[in-house]
Image (tube, grey):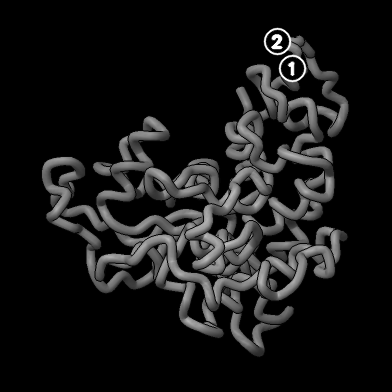
Amino acid sequence: MLAVAHCQDEGAVKPKVKIVKGKKLCDKGWECKGYSQYCCNLTISDYFQTYQFENLFEKRNTPVAHAVGFWDYHSFITAAALYQPHGFGTTGGKLQNMKELAAFLGHVGSKTSCGYGVATGGPLAWGLCYNKEMSPSKVYCDDYYKYTYPCTPGVSYHGRGALPIYWNYNYGKIGEALKVDLLNHPEYIENNATLAFQTAIFQWMTPVKKGHPSAHDVFVGNWKPTKNDTLAKRIPGFGTTMNVLYGDQVCGQGDSESMNNMISHYLHYLDLMGVGREEAGPHEILSCEEQEPFSVSPTSATSS
């Protein structure tokens, strides 16, 4: 079972290696299993350990936080193990992998923060303060999907998770992909931190729509922009991850507060992880203020 395996000495796992059609494939046991080219690289626990997770999310268990005792490194690394064979945090060398992790966690920290300007430790120390939307104003049931993802009576589809999910159709789609009945039981996410991270990593690794790239692909350089992308000022990097995940809610809006908040978390986490914000690249890579959105949201926005 994944849950206990990471107590082994970090970095001590000797990979099993096989060559298939001239390609080296590796299996590193619990953290990166199933023979993948990515498992031949460093795995996340080789360069990101419990103390770093604690540094990034240092205020999450203070009494005023709203999910005390919920989030921990163990849940994160267990969820991440499912995606490392697909390249999550394992696509390139150590620097590239640490940058991807800081980018993903930058989104998470920004979306789950209860930090504000004068908060103790500063506004960026409060990521993972929430695991659900505290006072939902509605139940986020869209009847357009009543045949594919019908709302369960009495159930609310407000934001839950490390990258909060909203709306019945998102719970339905992600639940199908993860083989968990989130449509009938969205509360599973707020009761299980591994699942709450898993739904977030799934969103990072999976295109929102057919024909679109994933946030992972635009960040690590797997995505090659088309002529239309170039005209729309969409280029590989952190800025375009916001475009993939949030479209017109954040991007193409000029210098917006929510965009800057995600960028600030990313840069702060690069510093805390010892990479340094200078590795993030120039402003046009970080920002999506001038990008045309990949998608225009219906009035039913997917994020708070």
Secondary structure found at label 1: strand
Image mark for residue 52: none
Residue type at numbered disc 1: Lys
Q: Residue at x 60, y 66 (%)?
A: 239
Mark 1 in CB contact with mark 2 (< 8 angstroms): yes
**Is the residue 227 above or below the residue 182 in the image?**
below
Which is more toward the observer, 160 or 14? 14
Q: Residue 264 placed where, x, y %?
A: 67, 74
Label 1 packing within 10 angstroms: few (<14), some (14-19), many (20+): few
Q: Amino acid at mark 2?
A: Val
Q: Nearer the viewer, residue 44 or 75?
A: 44
Query: Which residue is under mark 1?
Result: 23
At 45% from the left and 49% from the top, the residue drawn is 212
Cα gap from disc 1 to disc 2, whole angstroms = 5 Å
The residue wearing badge 2 is 20
| Position above or below: 133 against 5 | below
Where is residue 226? Give x, y as percent. 53, 53
Q: Position of residue 243 (x, y in %)?
A: 50, 63
Residue depicted at 75% across the width and 22% down the height: 28
**Residue 161 or 32: which is nearer the viewer?**
32
Q: Which one is in front, 262 or 126?
A: 262
